[in-house]
Amino acid sequence: MPRVDPHSYFDSEQPRTRHLELDLAVDFDRQRVAGQATLVLERPSAGPLDLDTKGLVIASVRTDGGRPISYDLDGEEPILGSRMRLTLPAGTAKVVIAYETGADAIGLQWLGPAQTAGRRHPFMFSQFQPIHARTMIPCQDSPMARVTYDAAITVPEALTAVMSAGPVGEPVGSEAGMRTLRFAMPQAVPTYLIALAVGDLTSHDLSPRARVWAEPATVAAAAWEFAGVERMIVAAEEMFGPYEWDRYDMLVLPPSFPYGGMENPRLTFLTPTLLAGDRSLVDVVCHELAHSWTGNLVTNATMDHFWLNEGFTVWAERRILEALHGPEAAAVGWAIGRTALLESVQRFGADSPFTVLRTHLEGVDPDDVYSSVPYEKGALFVALLERTAGRAAFDAFIRAYIRKFHFTSVTTEQLMAFVEQQLPGVAARVGADEWLNKPGVPANAPVFRSASLEALTALGEGWPTGARPAAAQVASWSPSELLVYLQHLPRQLDAASCRWLDAELKLTDRGNYEILVEWLTIALGSDYEPVFGRARDVLLRVGRMKYLRPLFGAMGRHPRTRALAREIFAAAAPTYHTLSRRVVESVMEKYDG
Ligand SMILES: [Zn+2]
C-alpha cells in the first residue's frame, strides 16, 4: 500500500482525482456545509479508492450515472480522520458523494454577528492548511494530489461568498432567501489551497489585477493599507518570472482568523491586525504574494517538507522588501525573524526533532508542532545557498526551479538533487545535511548586519545599566525598528521602568499589533497592572496565534496575571478558532499554580 503522505490516506497507486465539482449550501443556523462533491477521476477506473474525511456525514455515494458505489467508512483516527474506502465498479469516471460537514469541523470557523466588524451578519471562513480540507470535502487530501475545481455555493442572499478561484457569471437566486454563486479554478492546486469565506463582503479595486475584499466597515482602511500591492507584484515578478494566477485579490477576515495570512491562490486571506494605519505590516502581504510561486506553484510534497513552502517564501519576502525599501529594511526583517526562530527553538529544546527542516511527522499532528522553524531556519538556509552561490547564479537557479517544478509537489530530496545539478558543490560547501537533518541552528547561519540594528540592540540590552533612547531618536525609528528595540529589552521590568517606557514611547495605545503585543508581553510579564485592561480588550477580540502565545505565556509568570489569563480565556475561548484555543491551552498547561 504505497501511502506516501503520513497525513493522508491518499494512495499513489489508486486512481487520481483530477477535478472536483462542489455544489454546497452554507447553513449558518446549523453551522453546516451540505451538498455534494463530484470527484472526476483521471480515467475510467475500477477497484479501491481511499479518500480522506473527517467528521463528514455521508448520505450517498454514486457514479455520475446514478449507480451506487459501495464504501466503508473507518473509525476516526485522531489526526487523520476516517479513511473512506470506495470500491469503484468498472468504468467509473466520476464519483458523486452527497454529504454534510460534521459539528466542530476544524477547517471551518463560524462567527456570530458580534464577532464581525459590522455586527449585523454572521461570517464563516475555511482554513484547510495543513490537513483540514477533509473536514469540508471528501478528497485525496495530500499536497501530492492536485486538483482543479468548480463550485456552486449557496448562501443567504444578504451575504457574499468568495473562493480561491475566479467568479463565473452573476449570482442567481435559488430557494427563498438564498442565492448561488459560481466559481472556477482552472489551475491544479493542492486541496489545502481550496478556500471559502462567506459574509457581508464588499471589494475595492487596487489595480487592474488586484482588489481587496472586506466587510463594508473595514474595506476603506484595507484599501489604503494595501494600496501598494501592485508594486509588490511587479517586484516579485522581476525575481520569479510572470505571475501565473491571473488575479491577486486579498480578503481581510474578522479578527479571530488564527494566522497572519493564508496564501489561498487568487485570494490571499489576511488578519485585520495588519491594518496598522501606517502600512508598516504589509510584509505579510509580500509573504503571501511570494507564495504564489513558492508554495502554490511549487508545493511541498507533504508536511514533512513544509520548510520548502515557508523557507523559500520568507527568503523571497525579504528580497522583495529589499527591492522596495532597501537592504536596511530587509536586515531589520531578518533580525525580527531571528528572534522568532530562537523563541521556537527554545520552546521545543535545541535537540528537538521539531527544529530540523526535513521533518518526520508520522503520528504527529502538524498543527501541534507549528513554529517559526520551517519559516526562519528555512529562510536562513536559502539565504546561505544564495550567498555561497552568488546572487546572480542563485536568482537564475530560483527561476529554473520554478520553471521545472511548477504545478507539482516536491520533496526536500528532489530540491537538493536539483541544487546539485544546477549549483554543483554548493550544498556540500554549506553543510546542507546539518541544516536539513540536524536540530538547532547551525553555526554558519548568515547574519544580516546594519549599523542601525546594532545600535537598537545595544540600546535595548543596555536597559539594566541605564541606557535610554532620546526622544528625537525614538521619533526617527520606523515601526519595525521600534519593535527590534522592544525585543531586546529585558522580559521583566519594574513598574517605574514600565511607566517610563509607556510614557516615552506611547505603547499601550498603539494600533500596530506587532509593537502593541511586544509591549504587552513585557508589561504582563512584569505584572504591570495599568496594561491589564488593554490586554483584556486585545485578547477578547484577536485570535491570531502569533499574539496569543506570547501574551498568555507572559501572563504565566505571576499569580495575579495567571488569574487574569484564566478569566480572559474563559470569556474568549468560545470566540477563538479551534487552533487558537489549542495554542492557549498548551501554554496554560505549563502554568505553575
Ligand atoms: Zn507562509
Image (cartoon, grey):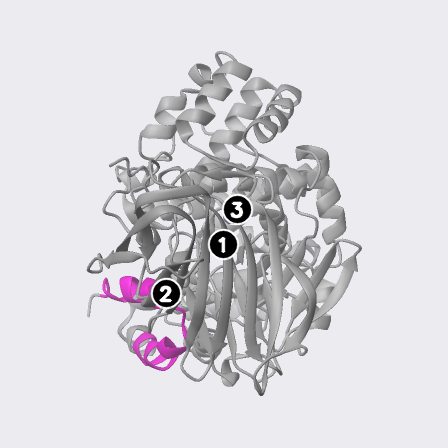
Magenta residue check for 569:
yes
Q: What element carries label 1?
A: strand
Answer few, some or many: residues within 10 Å of disc 3's Cα (few below 14, many 20 plus, some between 14 and 19).
Answer: many
Residue type at tag 3? Val
> Spatial distance from mark 3 to mark 1, Cα to Cα?
11 Å
Amino acid type, callout 2: Ile
Residue 106: mark: 2
In the foreground, 437 or 507: 437
Circle 2 Cα neighbour tier, 10 Å, few/some/many (<14 / 14–19 / ≥20): many
Secondary structure at badge 3 equals: strand
State the CA–CA distance, disc 2 to disc 3: 21 Å
Secondary structure beneath disc 2? loop
On the image, the x and y values in percent for residue 281 come to: 62, 57
Q: Give the magenta-colored segment's residue range.
A: 565-591
Q: Name the residue under label 1.
A: 20
Are the two marked residues, 3 and 1, in contact with CB atoms closer than 8 angstroms? no
Q: Residue at x 49, y 74 (%)?
A: 25
- Marks 2, 1: nearer the viewer: 1
Task: Identify residue type, mark 1.
Answer: Leu
Residue 305 versus residue 213 in the image, above or below: above
Name the spot of residue 486 as percent of width and height, x first: 51, 56
Percent position of residue 485, x then y: 54, 52
Please state if 201 lies on the left or on the right of 427 as rendered. Answer: right
Task: Answer whether residue 491 is visible to the viewer in this image.
Answer: no
Q: Which mark is residue 452?
A: none
Task: Determine the residue positioned at 63% across, 19% down.
Answer: 393
Tell me if 19 is positioned left or right of 102 in this view: right
Give residue 189's mark. Answer: 3
